[in-house]
């Protein structure tokens, strides 16, 4: 149907009955579900590899449901992040097949037909126990992309034995997501032990000179390890999404 | 009456019975309504094109009412911003013709005699749904200035189809108000598509490195698009006011 | 010629011989002059009202000349900013009709056929004598847009008489560009005296807590005057460009 | 009694029975009332002109009362700042002659024997109505120092008429305390109108780029007016205290 | 002559031949010497107690001479700050009675007729030897205001004996100017020893966490001593000017 | 038992049946108690001199109890910091010999067999009464390390007599922990009086330019006293721990 | 030889003649070339996938040559970054097969035996011409890792046609490196168009509110596009290295 | 002689012929050598354990020589830091026994009679070769305090083998000084391996998000290792001085 639309528009354009601006605007319109206060990007899977993920913060249950319905109708395996527990309880009544992870605060409505495909391996590592919620968000997101995911907790550098004990497991990764707050020394140390990208996710764990996660962020950005890249503070979703993208490419080639 | 006062003062000055400082002070006094803890600027419409807008934050219902009364008495079309819902409920009882916008948190007491005049067109654009309260404040303010106003929501750059679909509508603007948080890339992108000023209103939407809106602010200030100018974080009022000033000038000439 | 190209592309698209992405890419290509390390935007005047302005900082004389030639060939009234004096001397030999302003550091190659059209009035105001280079850059840019421009210097608030003496002249503006460093109180004061937009251009003039212009920038952004909007530090070009856009709209309507 | 102590200590020192360090420590001890978790400085009036002022924030009613009792016993006219309303209610029962200012949040126990002496004049000026609590703290403190104090409210620069109307009154000051938030342009403007020091007290009034008062602070520090000096954000107490010190010196000479 | 001008203007105003805005603008004009790129404030001594001081940074010898001539013609005791040595050498040829202080970088052209009047005492104190240039600028400025000035050097808190040895001399001050870099603990310590205002002048002396003087500035602003007020980093001129203003008021009353 | 494990692993390594990485991982594993979401470092006392201290913030009572049990089983004298009062009440029921300090918010389960050994002396000094909670955390931690500890309160520099009176006592220290907020001048002053290290612990006490303790932190870092070193804001635990380490070394030698 | 060493050490450990610490230290030692002031990591290729890259900044020609020799001796394809042109000229004499890229400032000594293997594709995109040096550093590094690399220049968002024209080429990437300064909107826009990771490299291009690249950095970190990750400002090397790691993994699987 | 002075002063005090302030001032004066623009603290060795160290930055050769002479005359083993090479060359002519370290930029005039006493051991560790100048300053200072000092270079965490190889040597320290720039992960890692204090000295090595050493500073301050304390950026002198103080105390007890 979209193809027919484009053909029609192109003919109008070729015939001089549409400006190029209007041609592009109308062509684009068919890729978007217009819900009034939200515009759902239905072409995203084609362009970007994965469909749109819903950011739950500050949206009402009604708004979320309206978006979920549009996505389900388009055959999308829905993932929403930052969904508070109370909202999840209400939403679960509407979407009985959905799964809510209360630590990650993610809400997912899996498609029954989705089949796991062989794929790269993501290893998520945390420096301390307080980093867990961010790590869980990363884990849920990476799982949603179809990657194989391991989670290794509480191996911060102040107790070096803890990391040494887990290194063989970590070295199996195709991509590491390293979640750490305070001075965030762990990504640099990990970076020296593995042969794959390390995605640093700084967390707001800490006080005083931690500056709400800014110190961890700056520390990761200036890492002396060449294989460390960084996303926003507490951005477990981004860490998991990028890891999933890299793991997917491992699979595909 | 004011003319007579000035004449009298000028004669005293010319006669050496007033210093120049005292002359200026007494002349100025007649332009101000002295309410004790607030000084209402009654000469503002003449000097600045529009009357004074009331900033509601931190004022009590009694204080607001006292100011509203003084303005209504002076024949002003009252607009107050940042008025909490509870205060608005109380105030609505006193001013039955007033209109409260709960998303924008604006309170307006329109003059029955105000007549819409032909005027320039303001288009307000938001990057995401969370930017709506700031955009609504801008919309209410621009409407109060007499401009024609359109609001286009949720066309952030991560889904480029969404913006393309709306471009023909946006290009009709005399001035664009672009409301965006996080990295605020939208004003730069818009700036490359339109031939009018783009007023960027950064919002505090985002987390971590968003720094409460500072990143959006800095991003807009360093925009590579030459037609982007910027107001304070979450300053929907300023965005709408400036847009109204520009639109009004379109009309006048 | 561009029309024929579009028609051809549209027919290929309609015939299924082009994807929509390739269609758009090829259509876009004709709007750009590809100079290797620079892509000159030839469609800009249509989209944005004015042609592209060249940012001279960090470009060699050869690079500048290559870009100037492409623009002149396209019939553009060339304006380049941040051109150092030595480069200007060399360039002047190649472009004998060009004018260099050594305070503003702008280089302009006017078209002989350009005719001044009636237009809005821009008034540029500086707080101190050190703000002059930024003000001159604004002035040259606004003149290039076709606006009528006045420049009023050194009327900072510490000597209030100086501003009072110039107010009648300033109040004739359709838009004011206010260039100020240090605490940048002048835009707020001006904002209370005029009925048009005030574009604040903070400068890096000052020392210590001036923080290289950040204090002036923050001060302007938090101005208590509703009609003050702000551009980047030392961004005389942007101030002049936006003023020109607003003045042009005065003319057109 | 203190004289006798010093004489005894000096004789021990001269006789070699005390080291100089111990001599100084013991001499100092008699100037301090040791209340366990607080050390009250009883020598302060001699050294610093005024007795110690009690900072109420974070102290319990019991702690405050213990300190008040020690000060009253030493014949001091007690002033406490940042005293919450609930604490003041309890304290008022114990000190029936005390006066609590709920806007300033100051608590004062005046000495019946204190006699007002002729003294310099302090004028406190606010930019907006939200600056009032800080201004009231300054007023209470300056009154406590014995100065004559005027308070002029809501004369921010966006409405220049308001300041002009009050200038003759402000120019009578020996020292001006200027309380302002946001861009804090008022001290610079005032500085150009008066022949006495202007003590700027930045307030945390504002949002976004106001940065909790930092912008007002930086703006005042970089004021182009040479007679503006600055204290901490919201530091009404310091503004009033310094004004009192300057006014007192006027009196004395 | 100015009186006659005012009388004429007032009559025109009273007769309706001048608007109030134009009246004020023309009245103000007579207080300003318009030098093209500089507007010299000739009314300043009446309004502000002292004439205008010239900020030499970034002005050419020609510009300085033009301003000096205007001031000398108006009978002003000229003081210029931040005058580089090379410029001073040239200027000294034109103004043979001038005095240049190479450490303070101040240039002064004293009036032969100026007579020292009895006045308050300013004591300037430095924490370290590197603070001297700023202290000298303060000293020259305070001397120019007519105050009696002492300078006490290198008594930072790390060597407490040094300060103790100088305390009796410091306690004779009517106002103390305390110049300090790094952590700037000295103003707080001094504040506990004297009964007059302490004007803190933070300097950019230090490295690393000194942040170019910001740490000293913030430290002084948060001083636990109530009698400490602060000016901009390296602002010796402001420190001396304010001290002079306070000392002058001591004399006058 | 650990020795036997190492011997076995080493033989496997020597025999080529283990890679060096796996050898190290397995050897490390025996030093860690794996509690699922926490990895307890049991080798720490050997490596670092003291066992692991538990950071209580954000851990549930159940999580704390699980960790306490593992530590008690390993014969460790448990210390937990940042334990809220409600959690402490619950925990006290399970560990009847434990001691909770509600000001310091520390929870300790002492071993009956621990014997105090002769050791260096730690003196903890506070600038104001609001610094007490941080100082108490430092005190509890230093006591746990076996050091002798004195606490001297409220001797900030604004009242110099207070410090002088306590100097002889402070000079007996082997290491001083100085806890101060606001401008934190006390460590510099103390540094000039003692012949041992001064560990500065900045506190978040203060407002405005105190920036939540950053000013105190920066001030201490730039101290002109050479013997001042610094830990994180409000890090009473670190101050006490380091003091304990230094005091312990005094004992040992 | 290393195997024999480990076997010997393991036997000593098993026999109790070595502590575990000493065992680990001696085993580690054989992986490092100790050059006195530099320790060259020879085991890095095994652990991290690629050998060590030399950071040239601040190293003398002699130091660089010493390191190069050690690496060449170990059979490493040498890459050095931030090598100034003068140093490169000297080094080129010693290493005649080396290649110096003066824009990237990279120095490479390729191994004759290195064979290009089929691998993923890296596309490097710049926003403006000033971003080229950083992009070239990324390109050289990615080439060194064996990836296929394309470079597309000057397609910043202010001229949207420029990007559209290049999109089909960019969409062929396995990983995009996006180099941009100022507000750095390009990575967000690109992120919405491609299905692979986008590594943002912020540059210090810009002035004023660009804050030396911090604004670009913060903007990229808060990108609304989920597939954008970030490295340090001007870190072309890291961008190219990470891209190479991802591309390599495409190849391997 | 000092004893006789104190006795005389005490008698005057006891006899009422001196105030206590004057008594203290005169007693203090004998501890200071007054050189005009510098006050040399001669009592410092008694109070603080070591004599005064001269900060060479910004002092002329003449000023340095004047201070050196005063110190030598008082029998002090002179140490000066931040002495530029040219100054050192001149000074070496005057003080033939002096030693200049051009990397550390320290100048020392050792006393022939100084005898090394048994003392604690300081180990200085650097993360990279660029940290050497700061480490050398620390080493020279620690040596001057009489400590035994080892220097271990270039063992940053990205190459973990390098640190492991040196751990046995590092573990012999009584105090570690860890010099690191960029993300400064090394102190945290070291902190987990040793049983003594680790003094972190952040360096300004790095670019972009290193922020001139601020990131390293913040990272060290938020270290998860409890035994890490921090001094100012590039403050090798302080690191060495504090290490010396701790080592000295090991010796003394």
Image (cartoon, coloured by chain):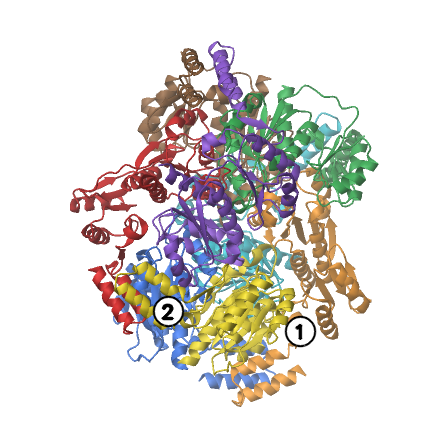
Chain colours: A yellow, B purple, C red, D green, E brown, F orange, G blue, H cyan
Disc 1 crowd, CA 10 A, few/some/many (<14, 14-19, 20+): many
Name the residue carrying label 1: F42
Q: Which residue is most to the top?
A: B15
* Front in this rendered view, residue E99 or B16: B16
Q: Is residue D53 left or right of residue C246?
A: right
Residue H203's label in the rendered image is: none
Relative to F87, say whether D246 is above or below.
above
Q: Determine whether the residue tagged by mark 2 lies in a helix, strand or loop.
A: helix
Which residue is at 79% across, 23% downward? D113
Using the image, name the chain to which the residue with label 2 belongs. G
* Residue G71 coordinates in the image, percent (x, y): 37, 73
Name the residue carrying label 2: G67
Q: Is residue F112 left or right of residue A64?
A: right
Quarter occupied by the C terminus of chain D: top right
Q: Nearer the viewer, mark 1 or mark 2?
A: 1
Measured in 3D between alpha carbons, the distance from the residue under mark 1 to the one under mark 2, in whole angstroms, is: 40 Å
């Amino acid at each position: 149907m979209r193809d027919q639309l484009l053909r029609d528009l192109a003919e109008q354009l070729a015939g001089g009955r549409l400006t190029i601006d209007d041609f592009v605007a109308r062509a684009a319109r068919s890729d978007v579900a217009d819900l009034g206060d939200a515009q759902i990007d239905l072409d995203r899977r084609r362009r970007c590899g994965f469909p749109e993920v819903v950011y739950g913060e500050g949206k009402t249950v009604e708004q979320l449901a309206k978006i979920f319905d549009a996505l389900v109708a388009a055959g999308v395996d829905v993932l929403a992040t930052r969904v508070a527990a109370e909202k999840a309880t209400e939403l679960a009544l509407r979407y009985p097949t959905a799964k809510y992870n209360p630590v990650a605060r993610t809400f997912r409505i899996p498609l029954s037909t989705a089949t796991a495909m062989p794929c790269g391996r993501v290893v998520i590592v945390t420096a301390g126990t307080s980093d867990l919620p961010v790590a869980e968000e990363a884990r849920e997101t990476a799982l949603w992309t179809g990657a194989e995911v391991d989670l290794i907790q509480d191996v911060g550098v102040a107790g070096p034995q803890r990391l040494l004990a887990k290194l063989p497991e970590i070295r199996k990764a195709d991509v590491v997501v390293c979640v750490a707050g305070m001075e965030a020394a762990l990504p640099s140390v990990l970076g020296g032990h593995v042969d794959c990208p390390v995605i640093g996710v700084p967390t707001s764990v800490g006080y005083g000179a931690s500056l709400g996660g800014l110190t961890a962020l700056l520390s990761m950005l200036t890492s002396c390890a060449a294989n460390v890249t960084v996303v926003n503070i507490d951005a477990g979703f981004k860490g998991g999404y990028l890891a999933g993208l890299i793991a997917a490419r491992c699979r595909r080639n």
